């Protein structure tokens, strides 16, 4: 990725140089960006955050950019049509923001070689298809460190959506963070089987609290679990957005999806003619993973959290630094090595010490 | 035993929206009208209640707004199906599509708003009784209302003249009309009662259960409420039992998961639906009793002979 | 005052005119809503109704979108005629996709020309199996099919979720929740190059014709029509209610299952957690929009599909939120359903001569 950044910068320099020489070769192309969302922007979660990113493009590029979006696009046969319609209506940069849009994105991209596509959280690329995702697990490691310090019952409640690698990775990373400061922490996991059902998420949170959890972590989209934490007088972490308004006394921090800079950079790249297919997996250092202000915790924990965040950003801490064993006791990551991106991408095993069985 | 009390408290909150909405639909269906638009009416109730509470600061006003909004939604349905004799099944489904869209449109300005949850009752001494105190005397008033309403509906149907008339209209609209009852007017009122209760159920979601507004936050609870009326074989007592059974199993499977039961979570999530089917099969096997309860004219348009 | 007076016979003219009237009224009310939202009403209405189908690709997509709706609705309409309330087509669709798609996954490197036909058979069996359970519970245990079919929908969806998150997950797919892609031999051929119109669309047309023949020419079609119009009479004549329950639920299930298979073997090409955006529920509306008649259902399915396509374009070109699509769809359906009254009744002005109930 750093190589790409260098390339991009170089290209930009060249382009600017060309303009400066009065050659006018690099005429700025107008950006017409289209977004495909899997949920409604009113979900206050995943799609909502992508829409904030879309608005950032309009704010940053002003008259040079127009954007449009289609929300609540089902991940079935409809996605392909929507993506194609965006391409047909003159959009030259299309963001498809859910894993389920991967195959239709690649398919339509083949038919529109001049349109640039950006697919979130997938793994298929092409000359005009980039992929991007955020290393939310880095934020979860920081959250784990905080939880390890804050818990009194040593039981963490974790509301999961579906047992996909993204969520499993988050659980592992969270626990590695927690164990780095408190080896006695245990995690209880409930799968809600939904990304989004406030009532059910809240009920899952209540079940976890009833079984002794005094820290609430969620990998579902609504603020309900954190609201329950607030109500029951425990603390927890927000997801996707800063949820402090919903839990002023309970939110320790939130792992915020922050796509603004990436979206603006990609739109600018199309404008400058410097866009090329890349694979971006941005972490805390890139700003894609943003930690909401640390609140409701003693100063020493806050200092530790800030330090951990900084060390992850600088690369001093890698959440998945070996040796790491899986539940069966098999050495997955050797001493002195970090997990490869490929291993992280497809992670379908719990680390040793997690007392739960991964649904297969 | 200290796990039992919080479990019961969770079950109460999970069951209350189902009970509120299905109590209303029970009356609607008893009059011979099948309104499949519960989900849509709940959503419009939820956003109306939330929007008014958030802007006025008064939960009472919010709840009133939710009731009115639910009634207005049911009025659309009633006008189309009772006055214009449109098909009830299709109109109900259309009402849900309309409600989902309408609530999302109104609610777009309220995403991310936080409000104070509906306060729970607190009676000194009584609420502080160990074990049962909080369950009996610590709920918010919509919970009590849901119980009161289902009892009232049971009383109304079995002990009052109005209940008899309602059942007559639902069982044989032509006879009821011949005796001189205004079938259409009674059905209008029954449908609007259903709308009001669905609106209340929506308000319970957005003001108490999870105090927020988010698109589609009912997440299918309107459909469960509809199924519960069938499950209850149109009897209020069974409706109460059914709503709490559904809530109990929904919550229990979450508890089982967090206690570390190693069954794939999808199978755990199936349990409330499967249990409902199995229990219905058991109680339905007695043919004669079901026949007596199902409103004979359900879903049929009525037009007085002229 | 306005009142309704029953016609002696259904007005043939109104059968065709009332939808037109409904659409005109929707245009009017829709136009008001759009201007209220600050959009040019003509642009908006053009975007909803014309833009989606002003080119051949758009028309082809209309067919692709309408295919599952029409196939399912034809099956459901038979049940609705016989007062069998199958509202679990969504679950039957899912089971059809699981059964038929499962075969494609088992023979994932097959090149056999028999694979696709075998998938059709299994898809239909899967749907019929899931529709057969409510039939069994209704006929054997008297359990109401509204509840059982709806609840089984949730079970089917969760079962699919289990399969694609677990045992049927693509081993080369980085453990994401999706199956392997179906082999080419397990994909529906596209019948019109450059579009997504697949064999399933042709099948939908066949289903419409077969449904029409079944209804108008066969004994069971006659029974269905009688049961729908006069249940008491049907009982006297000795039609067996149980057989009707089995027939309509199995048929509705099989057709829904096929529709599900067509989705996964057609535009989607694999199993994944979300295969249908609620086609099984939307098809219920389509069935009634089409007045339970196969030809009507064909048009109902096309109109419904058009509003979805138009809604997408309204978001893309006008920036209208998706919520407006729902609102607009709701209004269109209200008018279409309400205008049906004109086929059976005449609107009269003034007070009735005989004393009737005020409408």
Image (cartoon, rainbow, N blue to C red):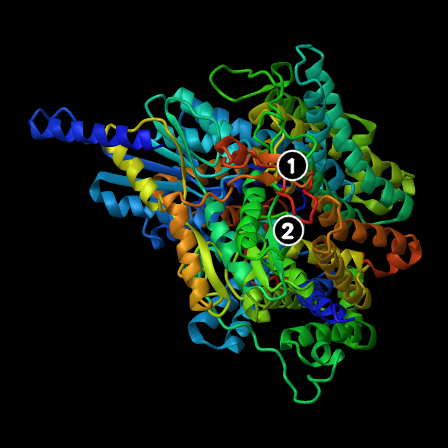
Q: Which residue is mark 2?
A: A192
Q: Residue furthest left?
A: A22
- Near mark 2 (Cα within 10 A), the count class, few <14, some 14-19 or many ≥20, is many
Q: Nearer the viewer, residue C102 or C201?
A: C102
Q: Residue at x 61, y 78 (%)?
A: B120
User: Where's residue B56, x and y in %?
Assistant: 44, 75
Q: Quadrant of residue B243?
A: bottom right
Query: Relative to A198, is B256 on the left or the right?
Result: right
State which chain disc 1 sits on.
Answer: C
User: Where's residue C136, x and y in %?
Assistant: 86, 40
- Near mark 1 (Cα within 10 A), the count class, few <14, some 14-19 or many ≥20, is many
Which quarter of the image is occupied by the N terminus of chain B? Answer: bottom right
Q: Disc 2 on helix, strand or loop? A: loop
Q: Disc 1 on helix, strand or loop? A: helix
State which chain disc 2 sits on.
Answer: A
B29 up-or-down from C238: above or below: below
- On the same chain: label 2 and label 1? no
Q: Residue at x 62, y 35 (%)?
A: A331
User: Where's residue B97, x and y in %?
Assistant: 55, 50
Q: How many marks?
A: 2
Which quarter of the image is occupied by the C terminus of chain B? Answer: bottom right
Q: Nearer the viewer, residue B91 or C131?
A: C131
Query: Relative to B287, is B142 on the left or the right?
Result: left
User: Where's residue C229, x and y in %?
Assistant: 77, 43
Q: Quadrant of residue B234?
A: bottom right
Q: Quadrant of residue A30?
A: top left
What label sits on residue B23 in the rendered view? none
Q: Which residue is mark 1?
A: C165
């Amino acid at each position: 990725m750093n190589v790409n950044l260098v390339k991009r910068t170089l290209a930009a320099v060249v382009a600017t140089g060309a303009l400066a020489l009065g050659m006018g070769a690099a005429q700025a192309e107008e950006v017409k960006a289209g977004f495909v969302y899997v949920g409604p922007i009113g979900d206050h979660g995943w799609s909502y955050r992508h829409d904030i990113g879309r608005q950032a493009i309009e704010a940053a590029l002003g008259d040079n950019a127009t954007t449009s979006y289609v929300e609540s696009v089902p991940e079935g046969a409809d996605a392909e049509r929507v993506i194609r319609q965006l391409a047909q209506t003159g959009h030259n940069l299309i963001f498809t923001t859910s894993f389920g849009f991967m195959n239709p994105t690649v398919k339509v991209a083949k038919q529109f070689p001049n349109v640039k596509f950006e697919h979130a959280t997938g793994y298929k690329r092409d000359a005009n298809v980039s992929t991007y995702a955020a290393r939310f697990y880095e934020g979860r490691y920081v959250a784990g460190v905080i939880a390890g310090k804050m818990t009194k019952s040593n039981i963490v409640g974790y509301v999961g959506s579906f047992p996909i690698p993204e969520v499993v990775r988050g659980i592992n990373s969270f626990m590695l963070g927690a164990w780095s400061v408190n080896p006695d922490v245990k995690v209880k996991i409930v799968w809600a089987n939904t990304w989004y059902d406030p009532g059910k998420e809240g009920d899952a949170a209540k079940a976890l609290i009833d079984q002794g959890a005094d820290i609430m972590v969620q990998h579902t989209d609504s603020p309900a679990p954190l609201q329950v934490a607030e109500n029951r007088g425990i603390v927890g972490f927000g997801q996707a957005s800063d949820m402090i308004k919903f839990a002023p006394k309970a939110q320790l921090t939130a792992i915020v999806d922050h796509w603004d800079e990436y979206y603006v950079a990609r739109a600018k790249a199309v404008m400058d003619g410097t866009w090329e297919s890349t694979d971006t997996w941005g972490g805390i250092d890139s700003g894609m993973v943003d930690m909401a202000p640390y609140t409701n915790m003693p100063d020493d924990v806050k200092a530790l959290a800030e330090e951990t965040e900084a060390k992850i950003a600088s690369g001093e801490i890698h959440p998945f630094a070996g040796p790491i064993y899986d539940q069966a006791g098999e050495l997955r990551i050797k001493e002195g090595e970090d997990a490869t991106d490929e291993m992280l991408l497809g992670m379908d095993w719990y680390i040793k010490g997690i007392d739960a069985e991964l649904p297969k | 035993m200290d796990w039992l009390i919080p479990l019961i408290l969770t079950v109460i909150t999970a069951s209350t929206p189902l009970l509120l909405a299905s109590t209303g639909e029970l009356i609607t269906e008893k009059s011979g009208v099948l309104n499949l638009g519960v989900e849509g009416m709940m959503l419009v109730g939820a956003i109306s209640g939330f929007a008014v509470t958030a802007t006025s600061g008064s939960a009472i006003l919010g709840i009133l707004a939710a009731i009115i909004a639910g009634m207005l939604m049911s009025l659309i349905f009633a006008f189309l199906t009772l006055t214009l004799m449109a098909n009830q099944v299709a109109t109900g489904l259309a009402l849900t599509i309309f409600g989902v869209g309408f609530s999302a449109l109104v609610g777009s300005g309220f995403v991310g708003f936080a409000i104070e949850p509906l306060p729970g009752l607190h009676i000194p001494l009584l609420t502080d009784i160990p074990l049962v105190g909080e369950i009996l005397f610590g709920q918010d008033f919509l919970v009590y209302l849901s119980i009161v309403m289902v009892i009232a509906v049971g009383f109304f149907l079995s002990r009052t003249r109005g209940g008899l008339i309602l059942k007559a209209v639902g069982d044989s609209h032509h006879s009821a009309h011949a005796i001189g009852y205004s079938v259409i007017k009674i059905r209008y009122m029954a449908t609007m009662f259903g709308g009001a209760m669905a609106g209340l159920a929506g308000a319970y979601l957005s003001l108490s259960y999870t105090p927020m507004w988010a698109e589609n936050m009912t997440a299918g609870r309107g459909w469960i409420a509809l199924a519960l009326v069938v499950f209850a074989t149109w009897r209020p007592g069974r409706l109460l039992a059914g709503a709490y059974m559904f809530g109990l199993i929904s919550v229990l499977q979450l508890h089982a998961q967090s206690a570390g039961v190693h069954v794939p979570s999808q199978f755990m999530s199936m349990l409330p639906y499967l249990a409902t089917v199995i229990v219905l099969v058991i109680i339905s096997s007695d043919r004669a009793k079901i026949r007596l309860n199902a409103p004979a004219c359900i879903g049929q348009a009525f037009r007085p002979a002229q | 005052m306005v009142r309704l007076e029953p016609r002696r016979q259904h007005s043939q003219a109104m059968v065709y005119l009332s939808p037109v009237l409904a659409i005109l009224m929707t245009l009017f009310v829709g136009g008001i809503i759009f201007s209220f939202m600050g959009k040019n009403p003509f642009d908006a209405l053009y975007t909803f109704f014309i833009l989606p189908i002003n080119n051949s690709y758009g028309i082809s997509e209309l067919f692709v979108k309408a295919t599952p709706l029409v196939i399912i609705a034809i099956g459901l309409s038979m049940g609705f005629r016989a007062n069998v309330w199958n509202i679990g087509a969504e679950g039957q669709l899912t089971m059809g996709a699981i059964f038929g798609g499962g075969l494609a996954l088992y023979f994932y490197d097959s090149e056999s020309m028999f694979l696709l036909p075998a998938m059709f058979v299994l898809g239909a069996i899967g749907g019929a199996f899931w529709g057969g359970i409510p039939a069994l519970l209704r006929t054997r245990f008297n359990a109401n099919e509204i509840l059982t079919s709806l609840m089984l929908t949730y079970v089917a969806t969760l079962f699919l979720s289990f399969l694609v998150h677990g045992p049927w997950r693509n081993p080369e797919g980085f453990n994401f929740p999706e199956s392997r892609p179906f082999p080419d031999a397990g994909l529906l051929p596209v019948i019109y190059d450059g579009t997504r119109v697949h064999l399933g669309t042709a099948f939908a047309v066949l289903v419409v014709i077969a449904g029409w023949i079944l209804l108008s020419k066969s004994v069971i079609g006659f029974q269905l029509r009688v049961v729908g119009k006069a249940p008491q009479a049907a009982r006297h004549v000795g039609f067996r209610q149980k057989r009707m329950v089995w027939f309509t639920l199995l048929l509705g299930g099989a057709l829904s299952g096929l529709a599900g298979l067509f989705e996964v073997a057609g535009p989607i090409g694999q199993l994944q957690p979300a295969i249908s955006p609620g086609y099984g529920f939307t098809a219920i509306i389509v069935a009634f929009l089409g007045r339970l008649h196969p030809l009507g259902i064909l048009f109902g399915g096309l109109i419904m599909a058009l509003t979805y396509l138009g809604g997408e374009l309204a978001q893309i070109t006008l920036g209208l939120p998706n919520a407006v699509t729902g609102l607009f769809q709701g209004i269109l359906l209200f008018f279409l359903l309400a205008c049906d009254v004109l086929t059976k009744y005449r609107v009269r002005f003034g007070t009735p001569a005989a004393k009737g109930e005020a409408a």
